[in-house]
Amino acid sequence: MSVSDLIVSVTVLLLCSAAVISMLAAVVSIGLRHRLQRLAARVRLPALALLLITPFFGTLLLAVWGSAPGRWVYADDHCTGHAASHTSGCTWHLPQVSDPFLQAVLLAGLLILTLLTAQRTLRLRRGLHQLETLKRLALFDTTLGVWRLSIDSPRAFTAGLWRPACFISEGLLQRLDAVEVAQVCAHEQAHARRRDGLRQWVLRLLSWGHLPAVRNRLLKDWELACEQACDASVARHASDRIALAQTLLRVARLQLDYNNTLPATCHLTGGDLECRVLALLHPAPHRPISALLLATTTASVIIAAVGGLAPLFHNWLEWL
């Protein structure tokens, strides 16, 4: 098998696996989203992360499992006589694509995907370079533990991957009192401790196998849960939660015209602000057992479904 034939075969295998898994992940995600929304944010985050990465790992699992279902589950000996390499029971093998037009289309699609990936990588590098420029222009406040930007627009955000930095503008510092400034800085420092920018970037990368509408909804749910978890770490008592809710609303009014452009950035008023305020005023119960059961059930359902689909998937690849 030539290199181009190998690339085409692997591409077909992964694309077909991704198509099947994306439909399965959509059904599972739609069924679990509303149940997850009843849980506390800190408990909800790992379950949402599992749903987001399901297409990536599910695609790899189905690609390997479906290439040789007879190794793990029973499959009819449908391969006998297909080709010289199929003279006996069906062993692990890649799908064979002989149509030159289909090969050309797949190679062109793979090239476009590679170019898009390179473009996003360059965009990330550009954003990280802008972040270093911001640090050089800002002044680190050892008392607040954040970088102060000498700009009038009211901004507060955390940006970066491995070593995230918290920023707050002089314009926002001048508009808030000492208690509100402390709450804003504590919220951003919670993002930095958790490395939420890195987690967000990884989840965005590994969630590409989802259907676009499902992916966008799950990413928004994850962002909301992330913001709520940081809110909860700042406001541990009822009086603190009310004060933080007021601070969020005040900052949101000041930032109506602000658009975030840096990659891997967590903004103070990110997520659904109404849901964040409601969560502060009426916190959800902390039920780690429920999240564990949901995560375990999700993983079990996906593995069982992949195992059941593997022989059918293999037959489909042979038909193609």
Image: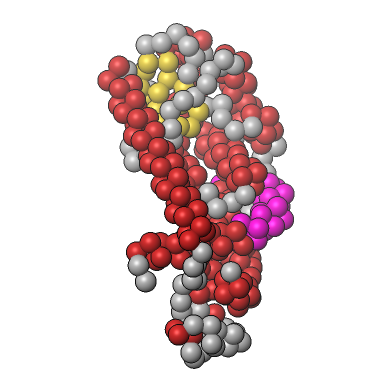
x, y (%) of residue 36? 67, 51
Residue 15 can be seen in this image: yes
Q: Main secondary structure of the magenta part?
A: helix
x, y (%) of residue 26? 66, 54
Does residue 148 belong to the magenta stretch?
no
Q: How many marks?
A: 0
In the displayed image of the protein, which residue is found farthest to the left? Answer: 136
Q: Residue at x 48, y 11 (%)?
A: 153
In the displayed image of the protein, which residue is found farthest to the front? Answer: 100
x, y (%) of residue 25? 63, 57
Q: Would you say 295 lies left or right of 282 here?
A: left
Asked which quadrant contains residue 252, the reply is: top right
Q: Nearer the viewer, residue 144 or 91?
A: 91
Q: Would you say 278 lies left or right of 225 here?
A: right
Question: Start and end of the magenta stretch?
Answer: 21-43
Q: Nearer the viewer, residue 3 or 188?
A: 3
From the viewer's perspective, is residue 49 above or below residue 260? below
Q: Nearer the viewer, residue 138 or 282?
A: 138
Does residue 27 belong to the magenta stretch?
yes
Residue 195 can be seen in this image: no
Q: Would you say 97 lies left or right of 290 here?
A: left
